[in-house]
Image (cartoon, rainbow, N blue to C red):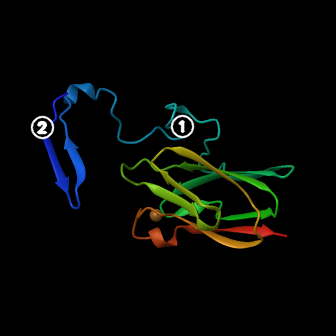
Amino acid sequence: MKVIADMPVGFGEPHYVQMIKLSRFTSAIDVYQPGTDALTMTSSSVATAAGQQRIERDGTKVHVYMTAMRSHFSPDVIRVKKGDHVVIHVTSIEQTADATHGFAIPGYNIQLSIDPGEVLTAEFHADKTGSSAFYCTEFCSALHLEMQGWLLVEP
Ligand SMILES: [Cu+2]
């Protein structure tokens, strides 16, 4: 491949430009099919459709099957006990290109960026009692700042 430009931008960070024939992009998509695992490009076994959101407890393991759609997460309250292992599967049920959502729980170092139709999973050990806000970290719409919920960890 031939480099056609090589230039420093700002303080010397290199940026390279290459050309690729458009014909090479034969399977380009705008959005994932709803419930896609983007790593395998297959339907995710933990995908959640609208109306199927739920929280399931199995001993000390809590699975949250969540959807993200402008401008809310569902469920938007997750109640667990200190010591639980929490697994949150977030399915973006968006089908609008560029309507990316984020999902962050800062106190647990969780940060996801979820493309339309994509399913991503975050898991953590709920080791702190109290309430933590979770919220969207991608500017998704005029109501983006409303896109939040609560993780409640009971003693
Ligand atoms: Cu948002």
Asked whether, in this view, residue 10 is left or right of residue 60, the answer is left
Name the outermost residue toward the right.
59
Disc 2, SS? loop
Where residue 92 sits in the image (x, y, percent)? 52, 50
Asked if residue 118 is positioned above or below residue 67 in the image, the reply reads above
Of the image marks 1 and 2, the number of the one nearer the N terminus: 2
Check residue 4 in the rendering and tell me which mark sits there, or answer none: 2
Q: Residue at x 51, y 63 (%)?
A: 136
The residue at 33%/33% (across/down) is 28
Image quarter hosting the N terminus: top left
Question: Quadrant location of the C terminus?
Answer: bottom right
Q: Is residue 110 above or below residue 61?
A: below
Q: At label 1, which amino acid type do we have?
A: Asp
10 Å neighbourhood of mark 1: few (<14), some, or many (≥20)? many
The residue tagged 1 is 37
Task: Please give the label number shown on residue 50.
Answer: none
At horizontal 56% and vertical 46% (from top left) the residue drawn is: 120
**Residue 20: which quarter of the image?**
top left
Task: Report x, y in % for residue 55.
Answer: 74, 53
Secondary structure of residue under mark 1: strand
The quarter holding residue 138 reads bottom left
- Mark 1 → mark 2, Cα distance in angstroms: 35 Å
For badge 2, the amino acid type reads Ile
74 or 12: which is nearer to us? 12
